[in-house]
Image: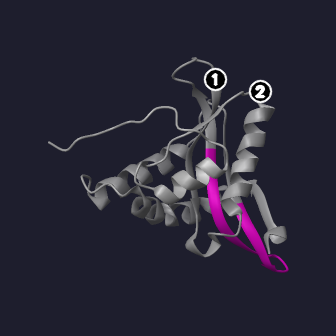
Amino acid sequence: MTNDIVIREAQETDRTFIFELSPRLTEAAGMPWHTDSAITKMQDDYITQMLCPTYVPHITLIAERKVAENNLVPLGFIHARAHNDSISGETCGTIPLLAVSGEAQGMGVGKRLIAAAETWAKDLGYRLLHLEVFANNKNAYDFYKSQNFEAETIHMIKTL
């Protein structure tokens, strides 16, 4: 079934699908000190910004599966862009957003999207690929570890 998954650059027509995955990102955050509406607004604002034209090298990719002749179902997306590493200062790639539909989890979609983002970053000559994950999102953390990402810094917060 993973052989019929294709990765392509996002188009304007993918906008609705991308925003439909925002609630999954909110659910995964697991931050009880923030309201769901605040997290959703943050996600939606970032997605809006992500889809705007920019001079910074970036790419948004869509994974989709062919279910019938000329019928493709979107499964997930990834956004990658240039980023300055906070330690070395060198330009590298970063993945600020990766989301897969619930139906597509376990199909290898996330792995395929990460691999495509890695190719994009390597093609630009980047040595590092950065990402951030919500600390309480154990599933995502474990997935990224399985893709050979390592924790570098930890951002902590305290409710007062």
- Quadrant including the C terminus: top left
Q: Residue furthest left?
A: 160
Task: State whether residue 38 appears in this view.
Answer: yes
Front position in the image: 156 or 6: 156
Q: Which residue is mark 2?
A: 125
| Relative side of 64 to 138, left or right | right
Q: Is residue 112 above or below residue 117?
A: below
Task: State whether residue 51 appears in this view.
Answer: no
Tell which circle, 2 or 1, labels the residue nearer the N-terminal end: 1
Q: Residue at x 77, y 26 (%)?
A: 125
Can you give x and y, in whole percent of width and height, for residue 123 in the image? Answer: 80, 33
Q: Residue at x 79, y 69 (%)?
A: 2
Identify the coloring. one colour
Callout 2 secondary element:
loop
The residues colored magenta run 63-79
**Residue 143 occupies quadrant:** bottom right
Callout 1 secondary element:
strand
Q: Amino acid at mark 2?
A: Gly
Front position in the image: 134 or 138: 138
Q: Residue at x 62, y 69 (%)?
A: 105
Q: Is residue 132 above or below residue 64?
A: above
Q: Amino acid at mark 1?
A: Thr
Distance Cα–Cα, label 2 vs label 1: 9 Å
Front position in the image: 157 or 97: 157
Q: Which residue is mark 1?
A: 91
